[in-house]
Amino acid sequence: MDITKQEVEKVAKLARLALSEAETTAFSQQLNQIVAYVQKLKTFSTEGVEPTSTVLGQTNVCRPDVVEASLSPEQAVANAPDAEASCFRVPKIIQES
């Protein structure tokens, strides 16, 4: 399964990306190398291999989800250039159409 330059151009257009001819060619080649590597991986037998999500043996490395002291709403917006009712006010960036 080859990924053509036309397919790269189509995906770029859908993603609203402007690619040069050189980039389109390079991405097509890179994606084809990735697909070839995945096809190569599919040839290996994984029978008897236990599924893993990590090879490091770590389980939960997240901190405990406990309530801790934090800033009050007033302290959080104290240095904000513009705030209202304990909320940050920012300039409008989306225009109505």
Image (tube, rainbow, N blue to C red):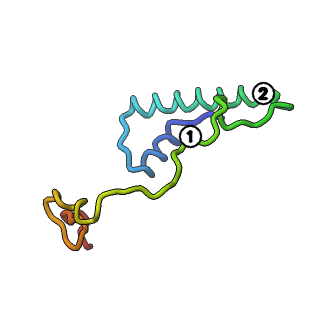
> Quarter holding the N terminus?
top right
* Quarter of the C terminus within the rendering: bottom left
Residue 20: percent from left, percent from top: 36, 35
Location of residue 56 (image quadrant): top right
Label 1: few (<14), some (14–19) or many (≥20) C-alpha neighbours in 10 Å: few
Is residue 59 left or right of 9 when viewed as pictured?
A: right
Residue 72, percent across and down? 28, 63
- Provide the residue designation for mark 1: 61
Q: Position of residue 70 (x, y in %)?
A: 34, 57
Picture quarter containing residue 74? bottom left
Q: Residue at x 39, y 33 (%)?
A: 21
Q: Please identify the residue farthest to the front as the structure is shown.
A: 69
Instruction: Tell me the number on the disc at residue 44.
Output: none
Secondary structure beneath label 2: loop
Tell me which residue sits at (51%, 32%) in the image: 28
Q: Nearer the viewer, residue 83 or 49?
A: 83
Camera-side residue of 67 and 33: 67
Q: Which residue is label 2 attached to?
A: 43
Secondary structure, mark 1, is loop
Q: Nearer the viewer, mark 1 or mark 2?
A: 1
The residue lying at 67 percent from left, 32 percent from top is 57
